[in-house]
Image (cartoon, helix red, strand yellow):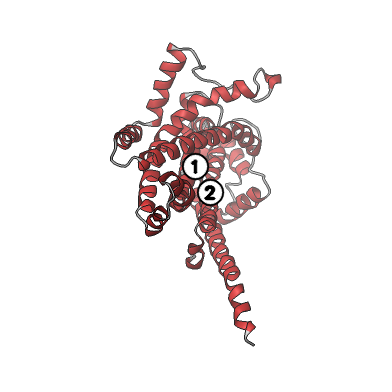
Amino acid sequence: MIGEPSRRARRRPGAAISLFLLKRFATFVATLLVASGIVFTVLDVLPGNVADVMLGESATPEARQALVEKLGLDRPALERYGHWLQGMAHGDLGISASYDTPVTQLIAERLAVTGPLAVLAMLLTSVIALALGIFAASRHNGPGDVGVMAVSQFGIAVPNFWFAILLILVFSVQLQWFAAGGFPGWSADDGGGFWPALKALILPAVALAAVQAAILARITRSAVLDVLREDFVRTARAKGLSRRAVLWQHVLRNAFVPVLTVMGMQFADLLTATVVVENVFSLPGLGRLIFQAISNRDLLVVRNVVMLLAAAVIVINFVVDVLYAVIDPRLKGHG
């Protein structure tokens, strides 16, 4: 009987973790459903016929009726919504009216550009921001700290599209180190290859990373400074550990908790920010696809791309929630 409470106590952390993950997963699923309902309502249910928007005012009644039947607009809204959800679950997003191509294929082709671009921009953001933030915190109120804060303030004030144009003028027009736009493709058979494709993404990635790195650097600096004021840091220093050892062995792990949350949100922001930057650099990614779909009145593509971006943001936030608890186990008991 004496050992029974201890066995129950050992099971409690596992139960707390399971409950935390269950709550987060339930919130994740509910948020996805709410997002899908909003996207569907805005593009399919609100006043105004989708077929009229896609065909224009000059369309004949026969063409309009044919498109209505093709899109299933003659069916009840709830039935259309359920059919859309079922199609997304099976990877069937319908056929694009303007491209006459499965929407799934269009998105997959464009993700081959947008995905690597967002990842490269996030890598640049993380490396630059963490290095500058830690550097500034370790030299608090010194010239290095003041310089980093001044540069980061400038980075926050600069719009992505303006910085993208500036990069083109300097590195493409003046120095001619990079192409001003376009994407050669990842396959050497298409005249591209890994390095030419990666090189085409460098300037867009830098344009995307500039603002995010400035924000993250300031947050990293603040988080590190907050942890440096904790009692355990003073204790570690009193035991003879150098400031550098305390910073890398004790401070960063604790400071990384709020930083991780911001990084997750920033990666979600980068996915949506590519919409503008891809058009500046004429990259055939999701951003350019959604602009072309809007111009062509292809609302089926618009709906699915918007839902994909919304789902990406929701998934990233869910992953950040889970990682947040892994890094800081105290949060699992409060999930």
Vertical arrangement, residue 236 with respect to residue 97, above or below: below
Quadrant of image for the N terminus: bottom right
Do callouts 2 and 1 mark residues in contact (Cβ within 8 Å)? yes
Residue 209, percent from left and from top: 45, 33
Residue furthest right in the image: 189
Tell me, for residue 267, which label it has, or none: 1
Q: Is residue 208 left or right of residue 87?
A: left
Residue 37, percent from left and from top: 51, 53
Q: Amino acid at mark 2?
A: Ile
Vertical arrangement, residue 271 with respect to residue 165, above or below: below
Name the residue nearer the viewer: 13 or 101.
13
Asked whether residue 110 is in view, the answer is yes
Identify which residue is drawn at 54% across, 48% down: 311
Q: Amino acid at mark 1?
A: Phe
Name the residue nearer the viewer: 221 or 115.
221
Q: Is residue 286 left or right of residue 136?
A: right
| Mark 2 Cα shell of 10 Å, populated few (<14), some (14-19), many (≥20) | some
Lower position in the chain sequence, tag 2 or tag 1: 1
Identify which residue is drawn at 47% across, 67% down: 334
| Mark 1 Cα shell of 10 Å, populated few (<14), some (14-19), many (≥20) | many
Vertical arrangement, residue 167 with respect to residue 47, above or below: above
